[in-house]
Image: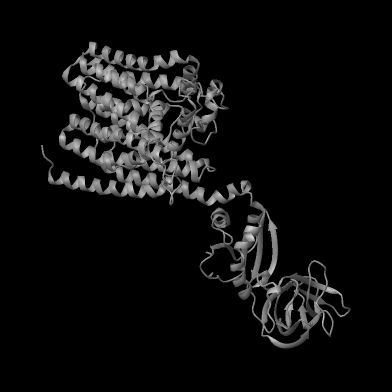
Amino acid sequence: MSLTAAQRRTGWLLLLVSFFALRLGLPLVLRPVGYIADWSDYFFFEDWARFTDRGLYPYLDFWMEHPPLFPWLVVGVYRLSALVPVWDNPRFGFTLVFSTVLLLFELGNLLLIGRLATRVAGPDRGLLAGWLWALLFPPVFYWAAGFEGYPLFFLLLSLLLAVVALERGSSGWAVLAGLAAGVGVMVKVIPGVVAPVAALALWRQGQRRAALLLAGGTLLAAGLIALPFALANPTMARASVMSILARGSWETVWALAEGYYSGGAVAQPETRLDPATAVGGDRSAPPATVLALALAGMVGGAALLGVRRWQPRALVAAGGLALSLFFLVAKGYSPQFLVYLLAPVVVLWPGARGIGYALLLSGVNLVEYPLALLLFADQPAVLGAAVLARMVLLLALVVEYSCVLFGRPSPFPARLALPAGGALAVLLSGVVLSATVTAATTRLPTESAAAAVTFLHAHQGTALFSDRGLYDRLTPLLRGSLATRLVLPDLPPRLPQGDIWEVYIDSEEGRRTAPGVRAVLAQERFPAESEVLAGLRLTRFAALPVPPVRALAGDLGAVRLSGGAFPEATRAGALVPVVLEWQVVTPLPAELSVFLHVVDGQGRIVAQRDAPPLAGTRPTTSWQPGETVRDRQSIPLPADRAGRFRLLAGLYQPASGQRLAGPAGDSLELGTLEVIAG
């Protein structure tokens, strides 16, 4: 029958929601906005495929944690990609060919989902299911980042053929379903979950011969594919199987219980030539997972034995139930496995219920990856929350599939999808925000620039960076104390109010990038203390009131001091701003520094500061005769001295200590400074 007006309105609403969900999801994971590089795992696949350049092949010369059909597809793609020109990226050819091959399987998945939904609920629902699958974000991303569409194709094909066998009572279709399942198992283990469910459904429906043929077809296909590799190199074949069985838990409650809060680790390509490395990791599978899988299989099998009438809808629900139970108790879970969970949801409920579950599962997946595993890798609570949220959704799906199998109404009305999704979003957002707030505290101990960050935390003002990498790295750690600002080299800096800490790497390259910024700072602020911590140069430019300049007549021969300024009175412990106007008489052959001395009535130095003029941005060798150089300096006063003091200034060579001298000597008196006890 055709769609009604109400159904069309619902379809458009779902289409719009999916459309925006897809496009809002992309920036979260793909660079330059997100944290995932283009092609993702494609790089890793190509790296071990390069062994074939040396005449080495999977299962024959090195072990793999995947059944043989996937690595050998990669090998074929890699050899074919040699025909593609490199152009500007050496990985372009492999990526182009591999993504094209996988796109064929993705197209097959779209058609299979449409055909399954058609057999379950009619052609209109089949079309709607196809649109929903096409617009979901995870299948799009995991096509571009992994290979799950390849084994998913054989899972869906086996399920569709089993549905046809169930409807027609045909043993031939059952054999084909078994063969498809067996091929799928040789791509990845997960498609094998559906085969026993389909065989049980046929058996309970009275098609016992078809059930046996389906099971036999599965074993036959898997055995015929595995046998040549087992005979060619039994050591590598055994190592490959052991690598799957012995692998440690990841991203599941088993991993959380062990205190492991990271993704699934895989061996590097160069280690795979040694079969001993297949089980040489520091973590092995917890024994309880085998018992849990067996228990889940028995519970699921017992539930399926109670189903009285098997129809296509029940068989798809049984497949969804088996997958949900499998991922509930499996030792490991990777975010790309989501496509297996989404497929039966889309087939059975290509409406509000299905889109609700799809968006909830996708949202949890995005929190898990990239947020938990990349951005908040040091915040285990984020991954823990994602794993537990996924478990809750899987339990809800178990209930949903059971209701379909036994013809009961769902206890979760479709209208609850929006509030449930909102509640889950609020919960996960709270966890992510909490992790963001505590990120600086948890990351600081491992940050190589921890000493510099700790120092800056104790001060106020703005940290100014001219190095984008340094800015990106330290800004999250400085939030809550100093403001941060990035200065671009091609644009004049806009200085904020208050003190400014100039931060750059204390190296030749760092010093080359800093002068442009420092020249502006030296003209508008007063350079003060400078520290080198953890390889970073931290220089404070203080925002101090500029005192009025008065005329002076100091003569140092090659340079005269024509004007000067400093406050007539200040408090003990203060930083005193000083302005010096140097009038150049003759060229200066060497670089000179400025000294400022505060001396008491007996000529003893109470405070002093030595620094290059204009914070080092205008060395004296660049001063031209007739030029007047306006130089801002500062001098810190001790907190325990008060009274009337004289302020002296001069120029000297830092290497030798020799001062520039004139008719009146080698230092010039600027005036008297009244220091009041603080």
Which residue is drawn at the image coordinates 36% and 22% (left, top)?
Answer: 185
Q: As rendered, which of 172 and 476 lies closer to the eye? A: 172
Q: Is residue 410 above or below residue 220?
A: below
Q: As rendered, which of 612 and 412 lies closer to the eye? A: 612
Q: Is residue 615 above or below residue 58?
A: below
Give left or right: position of 570 versus 167. Answer: right
Label tally: 0
Residue 457 seen in the current view: no
Q: How is the image coloured?
A: one colour
Residue 67 image point, x, y percent: 41, 23
| Position of the C terminus by quadrant | bottom right
Q: Is residue 651 above or below residue 412?
A: below
Residue 659: image quadrant is bottom right
Q: Is residue 138 above or below residue 219?
A: below
Residue 655 image point, x, y percent: 80, 66
Instruction: Residue at the far left: name it.
Output: 1
| Position of the N terminus by quadrant | top left
Which residue is drawn at the image coordinates 62% and 67% (left, top)?
Answer: 515
Q: As rendered, which of 222 and 100 lies closer to the eye? A: 100
Give left or right: position of 499 versus 364. Answer: right
Which residue is drawn at the image coordinates 35% and 47% (left, top)?
Answer: 422
Residue 521 image point, x, y percent: 61, 71
Q: As rendered, which of 676 and 336 lies closer to the eye? A: 336
Residue 301 seen in the current view: yes
Residue 286 image point, x, y percent: 51, 24
Give left or right: position of 319 versus 624. Answer: left
